[in-house]
Amino acid sequence: MPQSSVLTLSSDRLFADSEFGTRVLREIEAESALLGEENERIVAELSQEEQILTDQRATMTAEEFRPLAEAFDSKVQSHREGQRAKLDALARRSEEARQKFFELVQPVLIDLLRETGASIVIERSSVFLSSDRTDITDAAIARIDAAIGDGSAVENAPRE
């Protein structure tokens, strides 16, 4: 452990390389892939429906066709909004997991701070120049993994 009054840490790497972050990112990626597949299926269905509507157009008057076209447009808009809401929810879930992670790891980081005698930990990306010896990211990841693992037990624990 470095003995320095100022330490650096990469919060992005801390999250992404920890067991907790790896699990969360893997889950988000899997859900994102499912959402992508669902979106492709919906687009294919809507394309077929649009082609049928286009074919029907030739045999209908404008007054007959207009309600069908408007209904189709409403359906497309509804699907877009639904998919956008699902993407937004996925992004929110990712951000909430990240916030939860940093709440959970704060005691570990405080212990590292005390152990090293440091008075401050600075985000590594905000530092213009420093020695790699002041970076505690790897040590923090090892301790966090030992303390909370992938976090599934902590995330699913009942709240007080």
Image: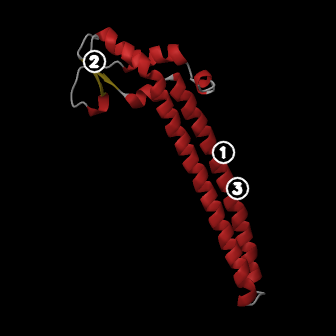
Residue 127 higher or lower than 109, as above or below: below
Nearer to me, 152 or 35: 152
Residue found at x 62% / y 55%: 83
Where residue 135 sits, quadrant-wise, is top left
Residue 70 higher or lower than 61, as above or below: above
Mark before the other along the chain sequence, 3 or 2: 3
Are circles 2 and 1 on residues that touch, CB within 8 Å? no
Amino acid at pointer 1: Leu
Query: Dot 1: what SS?
Result: helix
Amino acid at pointer 2: Thr
**Measured Cα–Cα span from mark 2 to mark 1:** 41 Å
Q: Which residue is mark 3?
A: 41
Amino acid at pointer 3: Arg
**Measured Cα–Cα span from mark 3 to mark 1:** 11 Å
Q: Nearer the viewer, mark 3 or mark 2?
A: 2
Nearer to me, 6 or 47: 6
Horizontal relation, residue 40 to residue 122: left or right:
right
Q: Which residue is mark 2?
A: 134
Label 1 CA crowd tier, 10 Å (few <14, some 14–19, many 20+): few
Label 3 CA crowd tier, 10 Å (few <14, some 14–19, many 20+): few
Label 2 CA crowd tier, 10 Å (few <14, some 14–19, many 20+): many
Where residue 41 sits, quadrant-wise, is bottom right
Q: Which residue is mark 1?
A: 34
The location of residue 72, given as percent across then percent down, is 70, 72
Horizontal relation, residue 89 to residue 125: left or right:
right
